[in-house]
Image: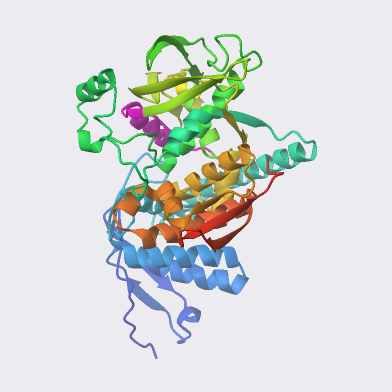
Amino acid sequence: MTKNRTAKAKSIKVEGKPLTRELSQDYFKEGASVKIDFETALDFILFQIATLKGSAKKLGKLDSLKYLEEMEVFLSTRITSLKIYPNPGKEIPYRYEVNYNSQEGETQEEVGNKIKGYLTSPTFNMILAQASPQKEQILEIIRQKEELRRKEEELAKREAEIKKKEGKVGKFRRSGHLTDQILKYTYPKDKNPQLSIFDSLKETTRKDIEIAGVEVKEIVEGIKLSPAETKVIDSLCRLLHETSQNSDPGKEDYYAGNIGYELVEYGEEKSTPAPKLAFTLYELTREYKGGTYVSGKDIDNVKQILTGLDSKKFLLSYVETTKKRDGGRIERKVEDFKKLIHILKISQTEYSKEDIELSKTEETIILLNPIFRRQIDSKFILYPNDINRRTIIAYGSHNLSDIALRLRDYLIRELSSKRYEPEINMDKLYYLLAEKWMRESRKKKVKEYTDKALETVKALGLLLSYEMKTASTGEPKIVFKLNKQWE
């Protein structure tokens, strides 16, 4: 006798036809088959995930089970509606409309990246393939892409192991001034309050800001980047190191790019070399992704990040110090309000419907801000060539948090300065890692992300351990113990 079941799964419509699923009697253990109509895409997806979880558990695939559980929790608690539409002519013939609930302390970029990660994952596409008349064709494409990705990751891993054994783990230089400006923050408890930032600037800088139409209250010193922008900047630093003349600091083309440089105005200097780089978007994207599989969507994403950076200006303010032979020094204040990058030309790469690159003949050409090379012969920080890949692995996702990247860069800077056991008050550390959230009184969220960041730098091998202590002021502080041999 067949029992009636009311299932949570309701429905999905793909290409205008309602989907129905036939489930075997073994699934419900009722001695009969059951037919369920799904009315929403979200319920269909959740139902399929539940089925896959059962299979993963039965087969002992714990990693897959964990991923499916995380995906299920996110989709069921955060997504309020999910619509799927046909997208003819594309490799995976679907497009999506998603509504979701936001959480306190969560940026739109963070939740957007998480949603994109799930909705473009092989698991998700395999689930949707069940509802398509092109099921076998789509599944085969997914399998081929996954196999290619797996082979590329294995190859990259073998190459890294070989280089490590041979002692040839390459490094690149990242400008110390660039790093300082990226890590710059304002701590509200610092003594001796000064004038407002705008009032303390030089007249020429104030005029540049006024021309740009930036409101005075929005002005902040330093380079404020998103996690994606930080990864792109790291990738550009690596390309600058690899493609530039980097053996003779006495020449003007030292760290000046691979197609000549341009002389630009910088601070009070009327003429200083600005590096110029030429590359394909594929090259930059592969660097950005840590050497793993690069898709057309990945390249479009990096292209958008570059375009976004090209539209932003930053207030740079720092001192360049030059040592004299007699033991003295010369200090030069640099103050400027400029872009970090300026796109001179951006490539248009052609792909087949199977996501295979057909043409990459056109180059992307970018003019970098002079800060990328200023005093890079004497004030620099060495980064491993595979820093993006290693950070992604240590964090456990391509969607790195800003806090994890800032903690990584802060500790690498301390290590570079031979401060192997640096310490900092916890409140100051929180402002360094997430100034905006701290000013919005989201300390609980900052602590949560900082805990994850500490796990990341330990997994990276950079941090050996840390200890919470009480400072002389009575405030809590953290003492780091860094790995002197880290490279």
Answer yes or no: is residue 44 visible: no
In this view, the residue in front, 211 or 431, is 431
Q: Position of residue 274 (x, y in %)?
A: 46, 15
Residue 390 relative to residue 223: left or right: right
Residue 368 relative to residue 257: left or right: left
Up/down of 380 relative to 447, above or below: above
Total number of numbered labels? 0
Question: Where on the picture, by quarter, is residue 206?
Answer: top left
In this view, the residue in front, 361 or 466, is 466
Question: Where on the picture, by quarter, is residue 186?
Answer: top left
In this view, the residue in front, 410 or 311, is 410
Q: Position of residue 357 (x, y in %)?
A: 50, 29
Q: Which residues are magenta?
A: 294-315
Picture residue at 48% right of the left edge, 85% below the top: 29
Residue 449 relative to residue 85: left or right: right
Q: Position of residue 264 (x, y in %)?
A: 40, 11
Up/down of 396 relative to 269, above or below: below
Q: Main secondary structure of the magenta part?
A: helix
Picture residue at 56% right of the left edge, 53% below the top: 456
In this view, the residue in front, 201 or 13, is 201
Question: Where on the picture, by quarter, is residue 265?
Answer: top left
Answer yes or no: is residue 425 visible: yes
Picture residue at 31% right of the left edge, 48% below the top: 86
**312 magenta-colored:** yes
